[in-house]
Structure formats: structure tokens, C-alpha cells
Image: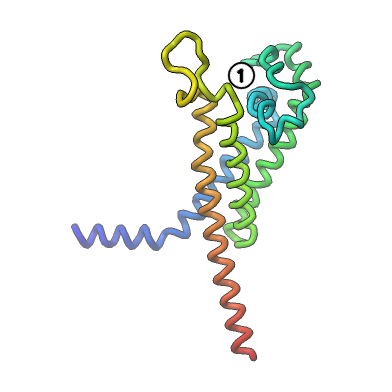
Amino acid sequence: MKELTQNLLVQLADAQRYFIHFVQISIFIVMAWIGGLKAFQYEADGIVPFVANSPFMSFFYSKEAPEYTQHKNKEGEVVPENIAWHQENNTYAFSYALGAVIIAIGTITLLGIFSAKLGLVGGLLTFGMSLVTLSFLITTPEVYVPDLGGPDHGFPFLSGAGRLVIKDIIMMASGLVVASDAAKRLLAENRVRAQKVSVGA
């Protein structure tokens, strides 16, 4: 039994590099999927509360919060008047651009499997994007259960939107793991170059 446990520990330790690659692939899958959905009306409508209330992003919209509360579409719902409001608000144009940025970050992170420099950039960008997303826990009222008469509302009672946002802390940690691994690879590459120069001299 001890030998089996020892073998398992050795295999897990030896597989660390593959697990980091799996993290990079996972980041790409999430980024590409979520980023791609930003091209669709229901997803663009859904991010409005986050963007409209964010001090980092609200300037992309032409309408001020909380006007959007009067023009919400349920997922899958198409209300022409609300669609027109969102078009005036730049909801869809911003969502397309955001989706492209998210896909780009995911792709750079994935390519980090083959290039340490890209891995470093992708990891840091993933961390930064997650940091902005987590800031929604402070700026967006919809991330907490509203006071509708029940006993559980406000902080720390996360709504569906809040539970979605808090998961980005995993993405943040993953970005740092990828960036750290890339930095280690770059340092190793620099040492090898320095040794070759030293031998050549």
C-alpha cells in the first residue's frame, strides 16, 4: 500500500507540467466559449448591469445606470423596444469588442504552452481580467440577493449573478499559476543562454 501511494505521489509530481498545460487549455475553453457568446443578444444584455455600474467600464455605454433596469430582457426574450434601447446604449458594439478581447486572451494563454513569453502575457492578462470581474462584487447591486421581504438578502448572500462572478477567483489563481510557470521557463532559458555564452567565451 505504501509503495502504491509513493508511486501515485511520484506520478502526480512528474505530471505537474501537463497539469499546468491543462490549466491553460481550460482557460482557453472558458474564454473562447464565453467570448464567443458575447456576439449574441442575450449575453450582451446580460452583462449590462456589470458594465453600467463599473467605474472601469461604464464609459463605454451612452446611458447611465440604473436606467438599464427598465430595459432588461430575460435570457431568450426578444423585446423590440428593449433591443432598440440597447442599440442606443452601445450594448452590442461593446459586447462584440469585449468578446474579441476575451477570445484573444484565451488564445494567447493557450499558445503559452509553446512559448513561455506568450504564457507570461496570457497568464497576467487572465489575472487582470479576473481582477476586473471580481470588482463587480463591489460595484454591481445585482450580485447580491435583493430585499424582497425574505430574511436572506444583501451581503454575503450571492445571487445567481454573484455566484457566477465569485468563480473568477479560480480563474485569477489559474492566471497566476500560468504566469509563474512561464516566468520559471524564461529564467531557465536565460540561464541556458548565459551558460552557452560563458562556454563560448
Q: Is residue 128 above or below residue 141?
A: below
- Nearer to us in this view, 3 or 148: 148
- As drawn, 155 above or below 117: above
Q: Residue drawn at (69%, 33%), measured in percent from left and top?
A: 55
Which corner quadrant holds the C terminus?
bottom right
Asked which quadrant contains residue 83, the reply is: top right
Residue under numbered circle 1:
75
Which residue: 57% across, 77% down?
192
Residue 85: image x %, image y %?
77, 17
In the image, 53 versus 73, the foreground residue is: 53
**Residue 5 point in image, percent of width and height:** 25, 58
Residue type, mark 1 in image: Glu
Give the image's coloring scheme: rainbow
- Residue 79 shown left or right of residue 143 in the figure: right
Q: Residue reaching furthest bottom?
A: 201
Quadrant in which residue 179 is drawn: bottom right
Numbered marks: total: 1
The image quarter containing residue 80 is: top right
Residue 152 placement (x, y as % from top left): 43, 17
Indicate whether 188 appears above or below 117: below
| Direction top: furthest residue | 149
Looking at the picture, tell me which residue is in the foreground, 93 or 125. Answer: 125
Q: Residues within 10 Å of mark 1 (few under 14, many from 20)?
A: few
SS at badge 1: loop
> In the image, residue 119 lies at what x, y percent?
60, 57
Q: Which residue shows up at 43% across the image and 58% down it?
A: 16
Q: At x 22% / y 62%, what residue is drawn?
A: 3
Quadrant the N terminus occupies = bottom left
